[in-house]
């Protein structure tokens, strides 16, 4: 008999008559949330998509840089920094640049002297050729 009644009911028509707002008003959402496995829910969230929607300028405007800097232990930072290596690296770079600059000036002076000597000798062929190296016998 119950099967006959259930088969004759139009469930869509019955559900259409239910006031869902009244039903939901009686639901304790805290109890529903307590039953949920939030780790399972978060596992389905695409964090890259969430971060892509973040307004970074607005977020950074909320960051208190002074508070972050005040938490830095400068003395420990200096102790852990190899200032000697930084100074050696910086000094060697300066020395290399100075040597390169000196070489460039020496080549420029060499060219200038060669032109003046060529003029003094009245040699208009241009720069004097470097001296020939003596032939050295090749070792077997």
Image (cartoon, rainbow, N blue to C red):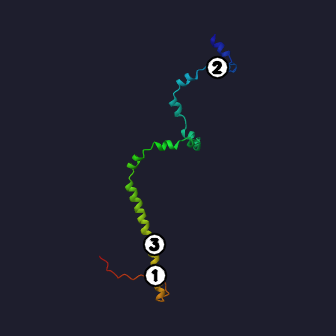
Note whether 38 is above or below 22 in the view shown: below
| x and y percentages locating residue 131 in the rendered image | 39, 83
* Residue at the disc numbered 3: 104
Q: Which residue is drawn at 53% across and 42% down?
A: 64
Kindly give the residue lying farthest to the left in the view shown: 140
Left or right: residue 48 compared with residue 77: right
Mark 3 / mark 1, whichever is N-terminal:
3
Q: Which residue is drawn at 56% across and 23% down?
A: 30
**Quadrant of image for the C terminus:** bottom left
Considering depth in this image, is 103 or 2 the residue closer to the camera?
103
Considering depth in this image, is 54 or 94 the residue closer to the camera?
94
Q: Which mark is residue 75?
A: none
Left or right: residue 98 compared with residue 18: left
Image-quadrant location for residue 61: top right
Please rate how many residues cluster around mark 2, counting C-alpha atoms within 10 Å: few if below 14, some from 14 to 19, many from 20. few
* Residue at the disc numbered 1: 113
* Residue at the disc numbered 2: 23
Could you give the CA–CA distance between mark 1 and mark 2, rounded to whole angstroms? 102 Å
Task: Kindly check if marks 2 and 3 are in contact, taking CB atoms under 8 A apart as contact.
Answer: no
Q: How many marks?
A: 3
Image-quadrant location for residue 13: top right
């Amino acid at each position: 008999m119950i099967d006959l009644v259930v088969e004759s009911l139009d469930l869509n028509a019955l559900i259409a008559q239910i006031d869902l707002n009244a039903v939901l008003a009686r639901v304790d959402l805290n109890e529903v949330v307590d039953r949920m496995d939030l780790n399972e829910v978060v596992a389905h969230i695409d964090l890259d998509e969430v971060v892509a929607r973040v307004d970074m300028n607005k977020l950074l405007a909320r960051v208190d840089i002074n508070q972050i800097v005040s938490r830095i232990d400068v003395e420990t930072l200096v102790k852990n920094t190899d200032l000697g290596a930084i100074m050696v690296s910086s000094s060697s770079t300066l020395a290399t640049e100075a040597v390169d600059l000196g070489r460039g000036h020496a080549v420029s002076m060499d060219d200038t002297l060669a032109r003046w000597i060529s003029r003094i000798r009245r040699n208009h062929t241009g720069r004097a050729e470097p001296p020939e190296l003596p032939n050295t016998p090749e070792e077997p």
